[in-house]
Amino acid sequence: MPVTTPAARAAAPPSHTAVPQDFGALARQDPEIGGILLAEAGRQSSTLQLIAAENFTSPAVLAALGSPLANKYAEGYPGARHHGGCEQADAAERVAVRRAMSLFGAEHANVQPHSGSSAVLAAYAALLRPGDTVLAMGLPYGGHLTHGAPGNFSGRWFEFAGYGVDPDSGLIDYTQVRALARARRPKAIVCGSISYPRHPDYEQFRDIADEVGAYLIADAAHPMGLIAGGAAPSPVPYADVVCATTHKVLRGPRGGMILCGVELSERIDRAVFPFTQGGAQMHTVAAKAVAFGEAATPAYAVYAHRVVAHARALAAALEDEGFEVTTGGTDTHIVVADPGPLGVDGRTARERLMAAGMVLDTCALPYGDARGIRLGTAAVTTQGMDEDDMARIAALFGAAVRQEGDPAVLRAEARGLAERNPPYPG
Ligand SMILES: *Cc1c(COP(=O)(O)O)cnc(C)c1O
C-alpha cells in the first residue's frame, strides 16, 4: 500500500483555521481555572507536542464538547433510553454510529465507551469469563495496561500470556505467537500496542486465532486515524472485535469506540451498558460524530498520509543524529528511538528534551532494561509542519540530548517552530 502520496509531499497547510474558544468570560468568572486553561493553551502552542497519543482536535469537535448535550443523561441506546428527553441525544448517537460504520466498513459500532480502556474492558466482558487466558503483546514490548498489567483489571481478572518481538529486527515474531497460542490455548488473542511502529499482520493473527479457536481482538487505539485515512491496513475484516480511542491520530474527543460484526453486536452493547458503564457522555458522542465526519474527508486522508511521511522523515533524521530507531523506521505515526548511542537512556533524554521545549514520552525498548523515547507526528502535522520541520526537530533532539548549546536557546528555537505553526491559527 502506498503510504507516501504525492499530496503527502506537498506543502502541508494547518488543519484548523479558527480559534477554538474564548476563555475570556470563564477567566472573569473563575480566574483560578480560567488562568489554568489559558496557561495550558499557551503551553500547547509554545512547545512541541510529540506525545504519540496526542493531537489537536478541531474547533468543531471542541464546540460539540462544550455543547448543551453535556447536560443530558442518556442511559441505554437510541430508542431504548432510561431517561426522557433523549430525542436529540438519540439523533446524535445515531449519526455517530452511522458515520463510524461507514468510515471503517464495520457492521456494528458502539460509540459509548468513555475511553480506550473502557472499550477493551467491555470487549473482554463480552467475550471472556474471569480466569480465561488471553494472549497479548507483553508489556515490556509495548503492550498496553489493559493487556495484562498487574495493577489493571486485565492482569487481576485474566491469565495473560505475552508475546514479544524479535530482539534484532524489533518485529513481532509470528512463529512465537503461534507457538504460545498452541501451548496456552487462549480464549482471545489481542493485537495492538502503544509503541509498535509497524502494522500488525492482521491476516496472520486471524489465522493463528482460528487455529486455536480464539477470538481476535484488535486494539487499534493508536492507528485508528491512519486506518480512517487509508494510510494503514484495517483490522475490521479480520478481527472479531476492534477497540479504539477517538482522541489519538483520529483527532476526535477523548473517548473510545468498539466495532464488530452483527453476531457479536448485542453482546458488545450489553457489555458497554449496563455492564461496565452507566449514562453515555452525549456531548462526547456528538463530538465523536463530528470527528468521524471530518475523518471521512479527502483532506483528512491527505493528513493521515502526511502523518506517516513525517514520522518516516523524523525517524531517518533521528538516525542521522545517532539515535537508534527500533525496527529501523516506521509505518505509522510512531517513532521509538534508543538514545543509548548518545550516552543516555530514555529518561535522561526526555528530561533534556523537556527542558528544551519538546514534550514526549519514554517507553520500553524491545531489548535490555534501558528505556527509549517514543514520539508521534499526529499533532505537529495537524499544525501544518512539513518534512523540513521534522529535520529541524531531529536536529534539536540531537543538540538537546548531547547537551550542545544552551537549553534556553534550544527552547527558543522549539518555541519558534511551534509559534510559526499555531495549532489554532487566528
Ligand atoms: C491509548 C491506548 C489505550 C487506552 O486508551 P485510554 O483512553 O487512555 O484508556 C488502550 N490500548 C492501546 C493499545 C492504547 O494505545
Image (cartoon, grey):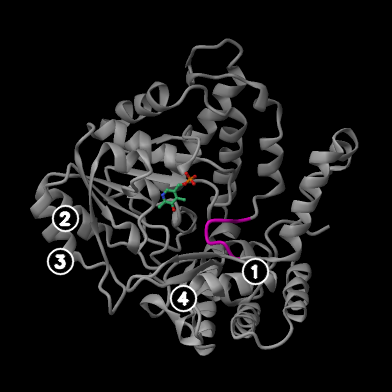
Q: Cα distance, mark 3 to mark 1?
A: 39 Å
Q: In which quarter of the image is the N terminus?
A: bottom left
Q: Name the residue under label 1.
A: 354
Q: Which of marks 3 and 4 is nearer the N terminus?
A: 3
Of the pair 143 and 266, the residue shown nearer to us: 143
Q: Earlier in the sequence, mark 4 or mark 1?
A: 4
Please, what is the three-letter code of the amino acid marked with disc 1? Met
For mark 4, give the secondary structure: strand
Q: Earlier in the sequence, mark 3 or mark 1?
A: 3
Instruction: Identify the residue at horizontal 59%, vertical 35% (top origin).
Output: 284
Q: Mark 3 points at which residue?
A: 175
299 sits left or right of 244 in the view: right
Q: Name the residue under label 4.
A: 337
Q: Which of marks 2 and 4 is nearer the N terminus?
A: 2
In the displayed structure, would residue 237 be above or below residue 425? above
Q: Give the range drawn in magenta.
A: 50-55
